[in-house]
Image: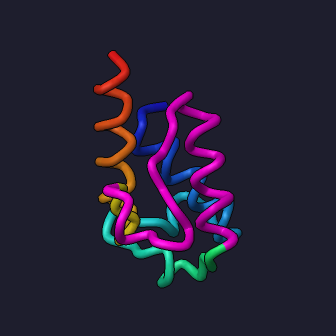
Amino acid sequence: MDIKDQVISIIADQAFLTPSDVSMSSTLDSLGIDSMGIVESIFAIEETFDVSVPFNANQPDATGFDISSVASIVAGVERLRAEQA
């Protein structure tokens, strides 16, 4: 499973949806994921990909990790993985 599919699976789990219900243009808000779900998604991403996501729930826009859409989250995870290599 590639990064995109794994991120979609994590987000779908948090939204109690199937991965096919999650598109790259979906926002977490449109999927019904609240702030606690965002934090849990970040933890799951960190665990799955063995990365440290620079995210602060109190200042989500100030961290440099864009959570505005599924596509931006996938891009952020891909960037973090590339930085590890």
Q: Quadrant of residue 37?
A: bottom right
- Residue 41, image x and y in percent? 61, 56
The residue positioned 68% from the left and 58% from the top of the image is 40
- Residue 13, image x and y in percent? 67, 59
Q: Is residue 64 left or right of residue 33?
A: left
Could you tell me how many numbered marks the image carries? 0
Q: Quadrant of residue 46?
A: top right
Above or below, 60 against 5 in this view is below
Answer whether residue 44 is magenta in the image: yes
Answer whether residue 49 is magenta in the image: yes
- Residue 4, image x and y in percent? 40, 44
- Residue 64, image x and y in percent? 31, 56
Question: Looking at this view, is 7 or 84 the one in front?
Answer: 84
The residue positioned 35% from the left and 66% from the top of the image is 62
The residue positioned 53% from the left and 78% from the top of the image is 31
The residue positioned 39% from the left and 42% from the top of the image is 77
Colour scheme of the rendered structure: rainbow
Q: Quadrant of residue 27?
A: bottom left
- Quadrant of the image for the C terminus? top left
Above or below, 57 against 2 in this view is below
| The magenta segment | 36-64
Question: Looking at this view, is 76 or 70 the one in front?
Answer: 76
Above or below, 66 against 43 in this view is below
Above or below, 82 against 13 in this view is above
